[in-house]
């Protein structure tokens, strides 16, 4: 009984063991591999990445015997590997020269960098291919460029590549002292620059030179080196070359044109002979800084000491300029504004000269450009005078004498603050006698004020913005009694001119006496009623003459 039970137990164990065996074999995973990107594209001369995931030890093969380039890269264990592949350095005899890991070159070393074309990617495990992909090496595109300018105060140590590139304004003319900038859109030139930098070092196989194209007669062309190379701007295939033009001599017998040449020499792995990549020209000119002022560089008392200075320049946009004015006597005063040049080459600054002494004059200029920009600020005081004598309106106007206006302007006639007449716009200086037309006829003798007004807003007409002349606290004004023009009756009645006694006089602006002669009244023709001349004979018809003669004869006979 016991032996039977033991045998049964052994049989059960054997059966269980056999059942467990096949179950363990079913959990084993097959070899596998994949690419992060089955189609990898890179420009000839640049570097790319190839990412491979694999379940165990594997080999990555790039290229084939048929393409003349084949390299095998061992991938240990399981996991994901990223291999950097530098197409420019593929002439290296050891794969570690163009791969980020070790490898085995299965073809002879290349004489030049790997050619543009399609190359196989394969991952094998235990001799079996587990993944395939493609590597496309594209040909280099043409290198393009554009010229520009940048301010001379750029800080290459403290700034970054993006900000330095943003400071460049596209333009072919450079003011001496600014940077000439050349923005280069490169293709396949990653190898030539040492990463992102504001002062990059360029590979010796890539050379730069700036050469004078039109030297003066019997002289050797000047040549210059590029001062700064700013690379990998904004992570794009672009770099910027900066050339400081401070040492350039601007010649009168030359158009001062300079050419930048970027050359890839035969020392590079991409070409068998020197190849010019960039030819870009700029013209160097003398800096120009010109100033104007609003209302002008001469301020009148009614300008309240305020002046807005506007400038135009050919200096690079974003250049900082120090605009200043200096009064040296009776006490020293300095005004200054630091402003930036806008994209259109203009700049502006507002000055308040209320603390300056008046009258006075002093210089205003842009620092470092004084010879080109200096102007003279004149702070003036008002001066002038006029005389207004009692008089009679003549031909709708009255006369104001001894008119003198230091800043020009107008003579205003008024009564009870109502404008009754305004002179034409008068220039600065002495005007003697000025005839002022009335805008409203006078019905009776009135006292009028003649006041000198300044054209404060300089628009050539009297308006609310204009102010009276004030000299030493007093307004330039005079008053006079103004009589209307002689009245004339209108209608069929006779019109009698105003007569005066021999002793009656009318004052004129010159102070002379005007004698008014008595005249016999004239009969106005009916059709002239309300207008026409105030004196002279009225013509009669022939019939009227005969009637008058007959009446006269009859009257004489009766007597």
Image: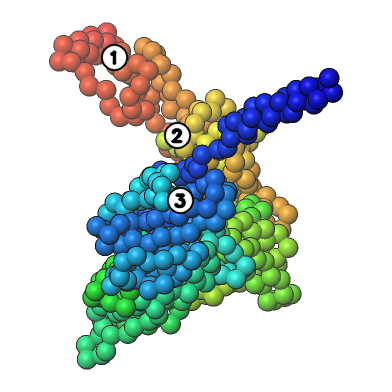
Q: Nearer the viewer, mark 1 or mark 3?
A: 3
Q: Is there a contact, CB below 8 Å, between mark 1 and mark 3?
A: no
Q: Residue at x 50, y 43 (%)?
A: 31
Give the alpha-carbon distance from disc 1 to disc 3, as whole Å.
Answer: 133 Å
Q: Secondary structure at mark 1?
A: helix
Image check: 432 left or right of 220?
right
The answer to whether residue 213 shows anywhere in this view is: yes
Q: Could you classify mark 1 by the number of other residues whose Cα lies within 10 Å: few (under 14), some (14-19), or many (20 or more)?
A: few
Q: Position of residue 100 (x, y in %)?
A: 50, 63
Q: Residue at x 69, y 76 (%)?
A: 329
Q: Earlier in the sequence, mark 1 or mark 3?
A: 3
Q: To which residue does mark 2 refer?
A: 396
Image check: 355 left or right of 228?
right
Q: Position of residue 11 (x, y in %)?
A: 71, 26
**Residue that extends furthest to the right in the rendered view of this protein:** 2
Give the alpha-carbon distance from disc 3 to disc 2, as whole Å.
Answer: 120 Å
Q: To which residue does mark 1 refer?
A: 527
Which quadrant of the structure image shows residue 67? Answer: bottom left
Q: Position of residue 94 (x, y in %)?
A: 41, 72
Q: To which residue does mark 3 refer?
A: 126
Q: Earlier in the sequence, mark 1 or mark 2?
A: 2
Between 257 and 21, the residue placed more toward the observer is: 21
Q: Residue at x 49, y 31 (%)?
A: 439
């Amino acid at each position: 009984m016991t032996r039977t039970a033991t045998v049964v137990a052994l049989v059960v164990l054997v059966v269980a063991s056999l059942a467990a065996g096949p179950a363990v074999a079913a959990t084993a995973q097959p070899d596998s591999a994949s690419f992060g990107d089955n189609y990898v594209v890179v420009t000839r001369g640049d570097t790319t990445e190839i990412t491979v995931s694999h379940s165990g030890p594997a080999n990555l093969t790039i290229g084939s015997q048929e393409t003349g380039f084949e390299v095998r890269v061992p991938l240990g264990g399981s996991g994901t590997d990223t291999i950097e592949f530098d197409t420019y350095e593929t002439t290296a005899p050891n794969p570690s020269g163009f791969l980020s890991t070790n490898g085995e070159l299965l073809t002879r070393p290349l004489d030049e960098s790997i050619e543009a074309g399609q190359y196989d990617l394969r991952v094998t495990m235990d001799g079996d291919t587990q993944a395939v992909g493609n590597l496309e090496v594209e040909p280099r595109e043409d290198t393009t460029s554009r010229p520009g300018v940048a301010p001379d105060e750029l800080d290459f140590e403290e700034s970054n590549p993006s900000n330095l590139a943003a400071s460049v304004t596209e333009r072919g003319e450079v003011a001496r002292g600014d940077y000439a900038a050349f923005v280069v859109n490169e293709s396949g030139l990653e190898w030539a620059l040492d990463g992102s930098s504001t002062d990059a070092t360029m590979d010796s196989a890539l050379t730069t030179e700036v050469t004078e194209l039109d030297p003066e007669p019997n002289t050797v062309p000047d040549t210059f080196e590029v001062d700064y190379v700013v690379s990998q701007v904004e992570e794009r295939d672009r770099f910027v070359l900066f050339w400081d033009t401070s040492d350039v001599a601007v010649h009168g017998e030359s158009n001062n044109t300079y050419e930048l040449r970027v050359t890839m020499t035969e020392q590079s792995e991409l070409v068998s002979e020197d190849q010019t990549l960039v030819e870009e020209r700029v013209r160097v000119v003398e800096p120009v800084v010109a100033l104007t002022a609003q209302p002008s560089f001469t301020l009148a008392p009614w300008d309240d000491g305020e002046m807005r200075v506007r400038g135009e320049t050919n200096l690079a946009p974003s250049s900082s300029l120090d605009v200043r004015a200096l009064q040296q006597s009776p006490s020293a005063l300095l005004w200054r504004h630091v402003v930036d040049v806008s994209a259109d080459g203009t700049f502006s600054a507002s000055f308040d000269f209320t603390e300056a002494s008046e009258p006075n004059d002093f210089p205003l200029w842009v620092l470092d450009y004084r010879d080109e920009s200096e102007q003279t600020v004149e702070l003036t005081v008002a001066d002038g005078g006029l005389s207004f004598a009692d008089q009679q309106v003549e031909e709708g106007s009255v006369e104001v004498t001894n008119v003198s206006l230091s800043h020009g302007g107008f003579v205003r006639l008024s009564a009870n603050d109502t404008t009754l007449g305004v002179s034409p716009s008068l220039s600065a200086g002495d005007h003697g006698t000025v005839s002022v037309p009335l805008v409203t006829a006078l019905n009776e003798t009135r006292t009028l004020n003649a006041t000198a007004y300044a054209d404060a807003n300089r628009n050539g007409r009297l308006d609310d913005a204009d102010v009276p002349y004030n000299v030493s606290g007093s307004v330039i004004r005079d008053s006079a009694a103004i009589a209307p023009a002689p009245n004339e009756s209108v209608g069929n009645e006779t019109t009698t001119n105003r007569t005066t006694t021999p002793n009656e006089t009318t004052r004129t602006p010159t102070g002379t006496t005007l004698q008014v002669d008595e005249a016999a009244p004239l009969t106005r023709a009916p059709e002239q009623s309300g207008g026409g001349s105030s004196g002279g004979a009225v013509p009669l018809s022939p019939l009227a003459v005969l009637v008058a003669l007959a009446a006269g004869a009859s009257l004489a006979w009766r007597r």
